[in-house]
Image (cartoon, rainbow, N blue to C red):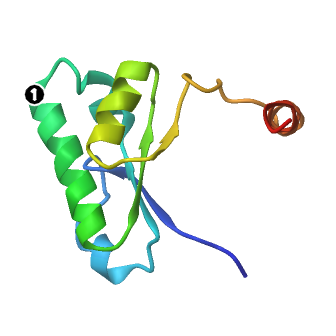
Amino acid sequence: MGVRFSLDDLGTGYSSLSSLIQLPLEQLKIDQSFVTNMLSRPGDQIVVRTIIGMAHSLGLEVIAEGLETEAQKDFLRLHGCSLYQGYLFSPALPANEFLALVQTRSH
C-alpha cells in the first residue's frame, strides 16, 4: 500500500523507546524542542546525536522537525540526518498552496 510509519516527537511525551522495536517503523522524527536549541545547548546536541545514532543502528531514517536555519541543517547533516521539515523551507500551507510550491520548485 505504500504506507510508512514515523515515530513523532521522539524523546518527549509518550513516545516510548519500546515503540522502536514493537512498531513497524521506517523513520524517527527528532522533536523540534531539541532541534531549536541544539546549537546553544550541549545537552540538546547530545540528544540529537544519540537519536540519529540509535536510528541508524536500527536501520531507520531520521527526520528533524522545526528546522529554521542553515546552521541547524549543517549540524544535522554533519551528524547523519538528511531529512528535515520546518520554516527554513516553508511554513505550513494548505494543500493547494503546497502543490503549487512543489511544482514551482521542481521546475
In the displayed structure, does residue 83 sit left or right of residue 30?
right
Image vertical order of residue 31 relative to residue 1, above or below: above
Examine the image and state in which quarter residue 98 appears: top right
Q: Residue at x 43, y 21 (%)?
A: 70
Query: Residue 87 at x, y = what percent?
Result: 56, 23
Helix, strand or loop at disc 1? helix
Q: Residue at x 40, y 79 (%)?
A: 23
Q: Residue at x 30, y 72 (%)?
A: 20
Q: Residue at x 23, y 70 (%)?
A: 57
Q: Is residue 2 visible?
A: yes
In the displayed structure, does residue 18 sit left or right of residue 27?
left
Image vertical order of residue 29 relative to residue 23, above or below: above
Mark 1 lies on residue: 42
In the displayed structure, does residue 57 sit left or right of residue 66?
left
Q: How many marks?
A: 1
Examine the image and state in which quarter residue 100 appears: top right
In the displayed structure, does residue 68 sit left or right of residue 95?
left
Query: Residue 78 at x, y = what percent?
Result: 29, 39
- Which is nearer the eye, 97 or 14? 97
| Figure quadrant of the C terminus | top right
| Figure quadrant of the N terminus | bottom right
Query: Residue 28 at x, y = what percent?
Result: 39, 58
Mark 1 surroundings within 10 Å by alpha-carbon count, few (fewer than 14), some (14 through 19), many (20 or more): few
Q: Is residue 16 visible?
A: no
**Which kind of residue does numbered mark 1 sit on?**
Pro
Image vertical order of residue 86 relative to residue 51, above or below: above
Query: Residue 76 at x, y = what percent?
Result: 33, 38
